[in-house]
Image: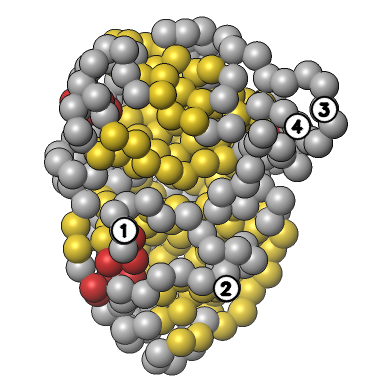
Amino acid sequence: MAYSAISKSSLYFNTKLYTGNGSTNAITGVGFQPDFVWIKDRTGTNNHELNDAVRGANHQVFANLNNAETTPTNHLNAFNSDGFTLGNDGSVNTNSSNYCSWNWKAGTTGSGTTSGAGTGKAYSYSVNTTAGFSIIKWIGNGSAGHAIPHHLGVVPDFIILKIRDAVGDPLVYHSKNTSAPETEFLRLKSTNATQDEAAIWNDTAPTSTYFYTGTETTTNGNNNNFIAYCFTEKTGYSKFGSYTGNGNADGTFVYTGFKPAFVMTKRTDSTSDWLICDNKRPGYNVINKKLFPNLNQAEDSYDSFDFVSNGFKIRSSGTGHNASGGTYVYMAFAEEPLVANVGASIPATAR
């Protein structure tokens, strides 16, 4: 039985849908002050914008682009106690357009100096060890084996890393990406299968204190600036796993130990789009509303998953998430745990 120390997942992760107004727009109802906000226009071809409180308001990098960080005005203007405030920029707030935001809470902040090989460099962070999430910004040193503190206290399972001040793909570490994940990486903006390159993670597994970067400019360019989002699995709240497709609309069942609120998948043995579904779009099974982190396209509609009390069931034979024999990794967060804690009498129910 997957008992969880987190009885209310929405205190740490929540999907918030909103409609643009073309003016100042205070988005409320997130349920906490978010530290990482990922926004996508559901009705238009705007980019996936990644915003965080460590870099500050109006600092965007993009999931689907390799562009350097932008610092425009009137995008995400503020992180608030129950959401965030938007300016009038059309990419996040076109009048009458529909948007999706995925929100995570970090919160405890600090700073220091990196270690490992080469010259130590300044870094700062925000972390929530209960939810297993941290945000780190730092300066690269160009040396193989640069050790970046993540402050989770346990080994991270999933990392999104992006160079801020130069062109470079957002890169992904996943602990279930092959049997030696520290030697592999995925590109968030790309359909590529997993790739092997020592210069990305220095072929060094993360520890409970650090993750490591090699000599690749896009992960450790000397004096370049970087941002990373680090996650570790928490029972009943988050899961970072893998599954094998069966090529059938009566697809694979993936056990998470909770009713999902968010699932992102990526095929690793062949090309495919990344895929995100959540519990707000459309709000019932079968879930047929999808957004693609590597694409700027509007929301698509075809059957993908059922979210049930203890995991998700694939409901499509599409090769993007269910090719026969295909291997996939996923990232999932809970709507509610299967059972909140030892002795709880009411388990989660299916939708």
Residue ID for mark 1? 179
Q: Does label 1 or label 4 sit earlier along the sequence?
A: 1
* Disc 2, SS: loop
Q: Does label 4 or label 2 sit earlier along the sequence?
A: 2
Question: Residue 125's spot in the image, x, y percent?
Answer: 60, 65
Q: Please tell me whether residue 25 is drawn above or below residue 193 in the rendered image.
A: above
Counting every numbered tag in the picture gives 4
**Residue lying at 33% horizontally and 86% vertically, measured from the top left:** 143
In front: mark 4 or mark 2? Answer: 4
As shown in the figure, which amino acid type bears the numbered disc 4?
Answer: Ala
Question: Residue 235's spot in the image, x, y percent?
Answer: 63, 43
Q: Does label 2 or label 1 sit earlier along the sequence?
A: 1
Residue ID for mark 3? 344
In front: mark 1 or mark 4? Answer: 1
**Residue lying at 19% horizontally and 27% vertically, measured from the top left:** 323
Q: Residues within 10 Å of mark 2 (few under 14, many from 20)?
A: some
As shown in the figure, which amino acid type bears the numbered disc 3?
Answer: Ala
Q: Does label 3 or label 1 sit earlier along the sequence?
A: 1
* Left or right placement of residue 186 versus residue 319 in this view: right
Are discs 2 and 1 less than 8 Å apart at CB?
Answer: no
Question: Residue 6's spot in the image, x, y percent?
Answer: 73, 39
Which dot marks residue 340? 4
Are discs 3 and 4 less than 8 Å apart at CB?
Answer: yes
Residue ID for mark 2? 209
Q: Nearer the viewer, residue 310 or 171?
A: 310
As shown in the figure, which amino acid type bears the numbered disc 1?
Answer: Ser
As shown in the figure, which amino acid type bears the numbered disc 2?
Answer: Thr
Q: Does label 3 or label 2 sit earlier along the sequence?
A: 2
* Left or right placement of residue 229 versus residue 182 in this view: right
